[in-house]
Image (cartoon, rainbow, N blue to C red):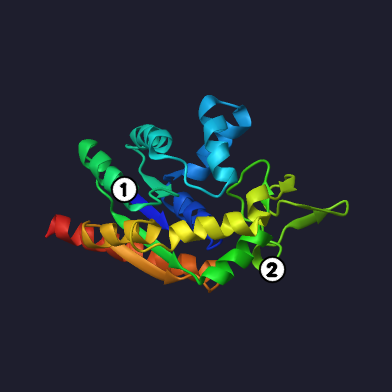
Amino acid sequence: MRILAFGPNGSGKGTQGTIIKERYGLDHIESGEIFRHHIKAGTELGVKAKAYIDEGNLVPDDLTTPMIVDALKKSNDRGWILDGYPRSLPQARSLQQMIRELNMRVDYVFEIELDREEAKKRIMGRRICAIDSNHPNHVAFEAIHPAEKNGELVCRVCGGRLSMREDDQDEDAINQRHDIYYNEDDGTKGAMKLFDIDCDARYIRVDGSRGISDIAEEILSEIEEGEAIKLRKKFS
């Protein structure tokens, strides 16, 4: 199973990706996490990527695309959920070409729809776990509110140290990222249109203003229905 995940920063896309990953045993390929790994390790890619990320800009395709191609190849047998790529129409076209060259197909595309201002508020309240950045922690939501230990907030899942990404507290950087995402011409919204129109995948749209469990239930239900249809076609 191969899935593309779309949603603005702050929509809970990463949280849903983790739920789906655990349900189906997929690899969660998250471009931002891979970049953070390289930045922390001080690699040449990490140094170059950090300069763009700190300004709220997209990392250029000549840095991003080779990383994504390598991750997809490694996850081909297990299946994957791709999160954070493509973020532009040119990236979407490149991804379609890569998938064809690798003899892959996208089975599902899900989009979490969320108002831009609400997405900004959510970004500024999220906290990042030092042990696993996919552990959801957010100071504004009771369901995923961090735990407390010795008077400090810690990861609700593993007790790890929490931090705030600098760019999560920079409204100008957030606005720049959202300018890219909500651009319906050649931004992320434009990329989604390409996969909605020119793709055999089942396209799933969900309302991101609801709770985590409600969103997960709808996405998983759509996937289960899609899998059932494929089975019926296979044995008909």
Figure check: 77 above or below 107: above
Residue farthest to the left, as pictured: 236
Q: Nearer the viewer, mark 2 or mark 1?
A: 1
Q: Position of residue 210 (x, y in %)?
A: 53, 74
Q: Quadrant of residue 64?
A: top left
Find residue 142 and name its label: 2
Residue position for label 1: 90
Figure check: 67 above or below 26: above
Q: Is residue 1 visible?
A: no
Q: Residue at x 53, y 25 (%)?
A: 44
Q: Position of residue 97 (x, y in %)?
A: 23, 42
Q: Residue at x 37, y 68 (%)?
A: 205
**Is disc 2 placed on a helix, strand or loop?**
helix
Q: Is residue 84 left or right of residue 171?
A: left
Q: Which badge, 2 or 1, comes first in the chain's sequence?
A: 1
Looking at the rendered structure, the kind of residue marked 2 is Glu
**Is disc 1 placed on a helix, strand or loop?**
helix
Which one is in front, 22 or 146? 146
Q: Residue at x 40, y 62 (%)?
A: 183
Within 10 Å of disc 2 (Cα), the crowding (few <14, some 14-19, many 20+) is few
Q: Residue at x 47, y 65 (%)?
A: 216
Quote the CA–CA distance across marks 2 and 1.
38 Å
Q: Quadrant of residue 197?
A: bottom left
Find residue 63 and name its label: none
Within 10 Å of disc 1 (Cα), the crowding (few <14, some 14-19, many 20+) is some
Figure check: 110 above or below 53: below
Q: Position of residue 24 (x, y in %)?
A: 41, 50
Q: Is residue 5 left or right of residue 138?
A: left
